Amino acid sequence: MTFALFLLGLLVLTGGVWALEAAWLRRRRPAGAKQPWWVEYSVSFFPVILIVFLLRSFLVEPFKIPSGSMIPTLLVGDFILVNKYVYGIRVPVLNTKMIEVSEPRRGDVVVFRFPEDPTLDYIKRVVGVPGDRVEYRQKRLIINGAPVPLRQIEDYLHRERMQFARRYVERLDGVEHEILVEDEAPAVAPPPRAFPHADKCTYNSEGLVCTVPPGHYFVMGDNRDNSSDSRVWGFVPDANIVGKAFFIWLNLNELGRFGTFR
């Protein structure tokens, strides 16, 4: 959000100088006189800033993964691209939806503005859409009364901690993805905070049950026991959705990860 405002400010500033140059300043300068430096720079950079602003606002936006909450799907240091138009065309900066295109689906990995602090961008996987009854009991995800299919594969080694975690392939509405589970960790930790529509959720020692309210989504990290998500701070409003993550374009620590995410 902060960078978007900064980019918009640069666009308005350079665009204003560009328009002033085209409409008035150029005519008032003596023939052969050079442009002032501030006019020259503004006129040169305005088209570049405009293209970047349009691409970033309506097509794709780059993000860097800052934490391990989406391991093993996304690693710390992954640079990803986010599709900005797949869920609708939104007003830049304000993020107000102008044109509806589609809605987030279960299994989508989405970037969104953190409900408790909209200046922060988070990334998680959608597991519940409006109207869903989401249960997470004894480390099993249940949607509308049906357990999400799960099969165990080889354990995952956290290299930075030299610790193993159980790894599973979860199939959510046809989308297969890997998740990590640590048996000794509680299903919900830390204790949930007060959040809008908290009355839609009930908690106990086994986990939680939530009914997703209209216009909201229930999201979780793939690293289930190392993710602060809807289990802790609640639902994500549709207005906070930024876009759908779909592509890894760089990881300086593991160059082979290029293009491995879809």
Image (cartoon, helix red, strand yellow):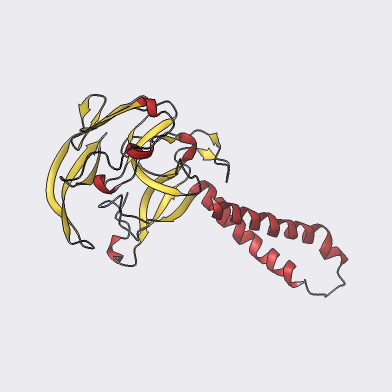
In depth, the one of 251 and 132 nearer the eye is 132
Residue shown at 18%/43% (left/top)? 169
Q: Position of residue 114 (x, y in %)?
A: 44, 44
In depth, the one of 115 and 14 nearer the eye is 115
Q: Is residue 10 left or right of residue 79?
A: right
Q: Is residue 230 above or below residue 157?
A: above
Q: Is residue 186 left or right of residue 198?
A: left
Residue shown at 56%/37% (left/top)? 96
Q: Is residue 118 left or right of residue 39?
A: left
Q: Is residue 136 above or below residue 169?
A: above
User: How many marks are shown on the rendered structure?
Assistant: 0
Residue 171 in view, yes or no: yes
Q: Is residue 258 left or right of residue 56?
A: left
Q: Position of residue 226 (x, y in %)?
A: 27, 49
Q: Position of residue 225 (x, y in %)?
A: 24, 46
Q: Position of residue 154 (x, y in %)?
A: 12, 51
Q: Is residue 120 above or below residue 256?
A: above
Residue 135 in view, yes or no: no
Residue shown at 17%/45% (left/top)? 168
Classify residue 128 by image quadrant.
Answer: top left
Residue shown at 73%/60% (left/top)? 18
